[in-house]
Amino acid sequence: MKQIKIMFLLLLIILSVGIAASLSLKVSVGVGAYDALAQSISFLSGIKVGTIGMIFNSSCIVGQMILLRKGFKIRHLLQLPLTILIGVVINFFFYEVWGSITIDSYILRVILLIAALTMVAFALAIMLVLDVVTFPLEGFCMTLSKKTKWKFVYIRQSVDLLCILLVVLLTFGFSLSLTIREGTVIGMLLMGPLIGFFMKKIQPVLRKYDLINEEEEMVANKDSVKVV
């Protein structure tokens, strides 16, 4: 019963992350560095942005397999359906649902971006507290951190910097629309504190419904310190 509840919760998380990510792309005031690179390559190649995201994340899973080898566990493979489902949801909502909608008001676009970021932070907080599966990029960075002894934060920030550099090169090299804007900065400032806030609020709720135990909560608290 507990496993069924967790799987149902994960499906809701996937749906909410996909919807929020597609909404943040739609409002066009800037997205995170990783998503910005995916969107820039989508502009250049004509491939849907959710599909580009699937390719990126699948590459991160392959990277984990190479680094971990025999240490790559079955639970790591849960990242693959997570990657596919989020990509499919992003493509559906970005192109089919939001595609015909025009948002002219800049203030409204910023408000929608903040709403999307809040939704993603809430979903990520639940995922961190459950400690069942992580996103491929974070999983790859954590694996690389363990193998090289470099700090996770530095590796993750380096990935963002590399993505920003590639976005700038693609934008000016191929005259693409700039995908890194003020929304990127807003996300960098809000995401960490929001995740930490929601994790503290979510833990007692999940404990009440017997979805986590004290040991899992201790792991979540450590993750919360890293995030915040």
Image (cartoon, rainbow, N blue to C red):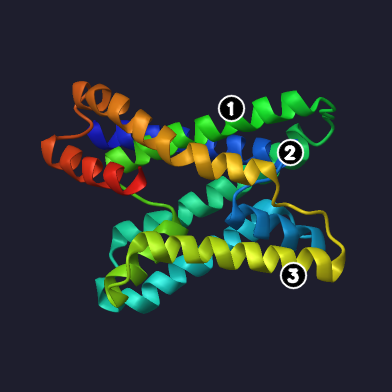
Going from N to C along the chain, the mark reached first, 2 or 1, is 2
Q: What's the residue at 82%, 54% (across, down)? A: 177
Q: Could you tell whether 162 is left or right of 150 in the image?
A: right
Name the residue carrying label 3. 169
Going from N to C along the chain, the mark reached first, 3 or 2, is 2
Q: Quadrant of the C terminus?
A: top left
Within 10 Å of disc 3 (Cα), the crowding (few <14, some 14-19, many 20+) is: few
Q: What's the residue at 73%, 29% (across, down)? A: 109
Q: Quadrant of the N terminus?
A: top left
Q: Disc 1 versus disc 3: distance between alpha carbons?
A: 30 Å
Horizontal and vertical percent position of residue 95: 76, 41
Name the residue carrying label 1. 115
Question: In this orientation, does residue 4 appear?
Answer: yes
Which residue reaches farthest left? 214
121 in relation to 181, above or below: above
| Label 2 element class | helix
Please state which amino acid type lies under the numbered disc 3.
Answer: Leu
Going from N to C along the chain, the mark reached first, 1 or 3, is 1
Q: What's the residue at 39%, 70% (across, down)? A: 64
Name the residue carrying label 2. 26
| Label 1 element class | helix
Please state which amino acid type lies under the numbered disc 2.
Answer: Lys
Circle number at residue 173: none
| Label 3 element class | helix
